[in-house]
Image: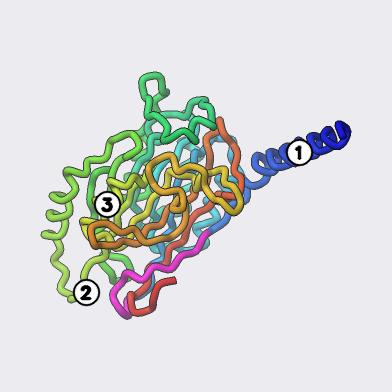
Amino acid sequence: MPSVLRAAAVASLGIAAAAAVYAVAIERRAYRVRHEIVPVLAPGADPIRVLHLSDLHLAPWQGEKIAWVRSLAALKPDLVVNTGDNLGHVDALPALADALLPFDGVPGVFVHGSNDYFAPSPKNPFRYLLGPSKGETESATPLDTEALEALLHDRLGWQSLNNAVAQLTINGSILEFMGTNDAHRGWDRLDHLPGLVDALRELDDDDTDDPAVMIGVTHAPYQRVLNAFTTQSADLILAGHTHGGQVCVPGVGALTTNCDLPRDRARGLSVWNHAHQASFLTVSAGIGTSIYAPVRFACPPEAVLVTLVGDDIGYS
């Protein structure tokens, strides 16, 4: 009997070791594009291809990731939405520029996550299972956020939605945007949101009868943010931060979202309901991981191509 137990223990260790190798060496590099169709445009409107990039956590030596992000330009998006946590190292900005410059000339919007302000630091990865991580900044290494914004706004022409609003006309449809700074750090100013949205709508001088499409953009999908966006009649909300759970259990799903979002919403497209209103919600599993926790299991890295279509086409 002891020999049987020893054999079982050895087999279990072998399986665990194989899973660890797969999670570190294979799945975290198994980049993919998730495709979604969301019917929020006016009937008969031309489709809009929205490329959602999130959580690159880029480091200078990650050439494979840089090349894959660059290759996404072949999808020919009409709009890029970047939901933050771009930088995974203090020296990552040139690498990020290399990754994103193929999108020069493509309209875009962005918000920040904490790893656009502070470099990552070593942490116990199991700490996330106990609840959302603490946003400690006292000992964190600051990043050059000003240079990051110069890249995103000045070089690429993307508009910041950090506690801000914006409006773009894409393929003949008016898109209105509202966004927050990183809610995980408590930097969202939801108290300012109604006034900003009202001011944006007062500027709408469109002569058509088609209503503008309202899109909410945030890094961390805390329920207070999703509820506020839905109250402001968001047709679609885009978010990241969760990494899809990063390490998932097949048949169970994500073990954590690192915020108060329910685990079954850790990634993918769903409908968020609040106060008798509803918004489409898409949460990206993200492209990268912290350099201190380079592992994914049952949760491959992804970019999301969201195709907005007329609401006469139907939900898919």
Q: Nearer the viewer, residue 223 or 303?
A: 223
Type of amino acid under label 1: Ser
**Residue projecting furthest to the front:** 1
The spot of residue 281 in percent (x, y) is 37, 58
Secondary structure category for the residue under label 3: helix
Q: Nearer the viewer, residue 196 or 60?
A: 196
Secondary structure category for the residue under label 1: helix
- For mark 1, does the 10 Å Cα neighbourhood hold few (<14), some (14 to 19), or many (20 or more) residues? few
- For mark 3, does the 10 Å Cα neighbourhood hold few (<14), some (14 to 19), or many (20 or more) residues? many
158 sits left or right of 103 in the view: left
Q: Say which of marks 2 and 1 sits in front.
A: 1
Residue under circle 2? Answer: 210
- In what quadrant of the picture does the C terminus appear? bottom left
Instruction: Say whether marks 3 and 2 touch (CB < 8 Å).
Output: no
The spot of residue 242 in percent (x, y) is 45, 44
Residue under circle 1? Answer: 12
Type of amino acid under label 2: Asp
The rendered magenta stretch, by its main secondary structure, is classed as strand
Say which quarter of the image contains residue 231.
bottom left
Which stretch appears magenta? Answer: 34-45
The spot of residue 245 in percent (x, y) is 51, 45
Image point (55%, 35%), residue name: 60
The spot of residue 139 in percent (x, y) is 40, 19
What's the colour scheme?
rainbow
Is residue 35 in the magenta section? yes
Q: Say which of marks 1 and 3 sits in front.
A: 1
Residue under circle 3? Answer: 227
Q: Say which of marks 3 and 2 sits in front.
A: 3
Q: Is residue 168 visible?
A: no
